[in-house]
Image (tube, rainbow, N blue to C red):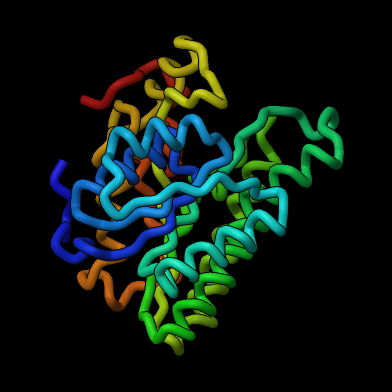
Amino acid sequence: MQLPYAEEFSGQTIVLTGACGVIGRWIAETFAAAGARLCLVDFRRDALERLLAEIGSDGHFLYCAEFTNDDSIASLIETVIDRWRAPDLLINNAGVYPSGFLLDINAAQWDHIMDVNLRAPFLLAQGFAKAMIAAGRVGNIINISSGASRKMRRSVVPYCVSKAALDRLTKGLALELAEYGIRVNAVEPGFAPGSEVSRLSEQHIRSVISAVPLARASEPRDAPAAIAFLASSAASYITGATLAVDGGNSIGSLDVYQQKKQAL
């Protein structure tokens, strides 16, 4: 797809975490096609190498990181600073979505979710924001959130909590980084089945899509276009905002509890 505002991203440097997930791959492919230089971050070395081979190695590099490890996060930040001084755009896309009822999960599982979904985005935003300020670079940070931040779901409550907190973190970062011209926003992508980490049954996929008001799953153009808008000059007066790109999935239910099931 042709990325909106593509000309603005030619030559820009972008750190993308969770690059090998479904949404991450779409983001990587789209921004690479626009001429951006990417630091592709994931915990799976083999998947990173496949992705780099697919998008081409021109100006890109990969980094295998473990987001439950502070030293790994610090090393990533240091590596990027050594190469670029500071990125133009940080996209905090990495996240985990394990299932488990609150009465069943243990403290280690809770901590793992919060480490990856909340603590790592904070540390990365903090480290790269400092680098942007030191380099005199007016950069952007985009956190990838979820409609789960507003719509609680049984068996994934810790995930919902982590995304609600990420929304607050987005606004807090936006507030405190505004004086440096660094904008911080969030995008909530829609349902995108196909993850190698969290496999879903066909029945589950059909059930979720049937509840989406716009009646389809997320497609490769959706999240990258929203990220491009928020990181572009067209959104120069937008910070601390959250843009839902989910076909209306997070606004309510399509279920109708009456005998007449259709309007008109």
Q: Can residue 154 be seen from the camera position used here?
A: no
- Residue at (61%, 35%) from the top-left corner? 97
Residue 139 is at least partly visible in this image: yes
Q: Residue 167 appears in which quarter of the rendering?
A: bottom right
Q: Position of residue 41 (x, y in %)?
A: 49, 47
Image position of 30 (left or right of 61): left
Could you tell me which residue is drawn at 47 percent across and 23 percent down? 257
In the figure, 141 relative to 98: above or below?
below
Give the quadrant of the C terminus: top left
Against 90, is 23 above or below? Answer: above
Q: Compare residues 5 and 82 and report the one nearer the observer.
A: 82
> Percent x, y for residue 201?
51, 12
Quadrant containing the N terminus is top left
User: Could you tell me which residue is drawn at 48 percent across and 75 percent down?
Assistant: 174
Number of callouts in the render? 0
| Residue 155 rendering spot, x and y as whole percentages | 69, 29
Image vertical order of residue 85 relative to residue 52, above or below: below
Residue shown at 50%/16% (left/top)?
204
The foreground one among 112 and 259 is: 112
Judged left or right of residue 162, residue 64 is: left
x, y percent for residue 14: 37, 59
Q: Is residue 104 above or below residue 239?
A: above
Choose between 82 and 127: the one closer to the eye: 82
